[in-house]
Image (tube, helix red, strand yellow):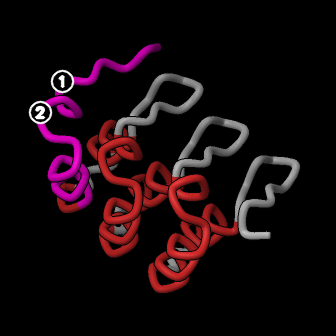
């Protein structure tokens, strides 16, 4: 079951994001659909959040194609967006990919912490 989660809330897509496996992520996103792509772990982090944290633009492109604006607008438990973590880490290209999907609304999104 591609939607199964570990005790920490990780899905197979989350694990692929942690490993920066964009090809695997594309395969899983096709199989699991929006439900899998929009899933979050126990910290509220989406697979896009993890990819943004690592500056993994290849994976972000795959994920954004599957999850669109809804994915990039998700906030983790601390109220942080994937755009914020990309910015904090200095991942300009990752931020560019995210903003293409989220537009001005993502740019203006206020963290809820």
Q: In the image, which residues are magenta?
A: 94-113
Q: Which residue is farthest left?
A: 104
- Name the residue carrying label 2: 104
Q: Residue at x 36, y 36 (%)?
A: 73
As drawn, which residue projects farthest toward the bottom?
A: 23
Rendered position, 21 above or below 85? below
* Residue in view at x 18 percent, y 29 percent: 105
Is residue 98 highlighted in magenta? Answer: yes
Residue 94 image offset from top left, x and y in percent = 26, 59
Identify the disc placed on residue 33: none
The quarter of the image holding the N terminus is bottom right
* Element marked by disc 2: helix
Q: Which mark is residue 108?
A: 1
Q: Residue furthest right?
A: 7
Give the percent coordinates (x, y) of residue 68. 32, 52
Point 15% across, 52% down: residue: 100
SS under mark 1: helix
Cβ atoms at labels 2 and 1 below 8 Å apart: yes
Q: Is residue 73 above or below residue 46?
A: above
Q: Classify 10 Å Cα crowding around label 1: few (below 14), some (14-19), many (20 and above).
A: few
């Amino acid at each position: 079951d591609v939607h199964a989660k570990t005790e920490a809330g990780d899905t197979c897509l989350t694990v692929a994001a942690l490993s920066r496996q964009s090809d695997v992520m594309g395969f899983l996103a096709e199989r699991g659909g929006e439900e899998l792509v929009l899933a979050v772990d126990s910290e509220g982090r989406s697979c896009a959040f993890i990819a943004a944290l690592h500056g993994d633009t290849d994976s972000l492109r795959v994920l954004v194609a599957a999850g669109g604006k809804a994915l990039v607008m998700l906030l983790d438990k601390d109220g942080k967006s994937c755009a914020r973590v990309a910015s904090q880490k200095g991942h300009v290209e990752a931020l560019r990919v995210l903003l293409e999907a989220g537009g001005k609304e993502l740019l203006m999104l206020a963290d809820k912490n």
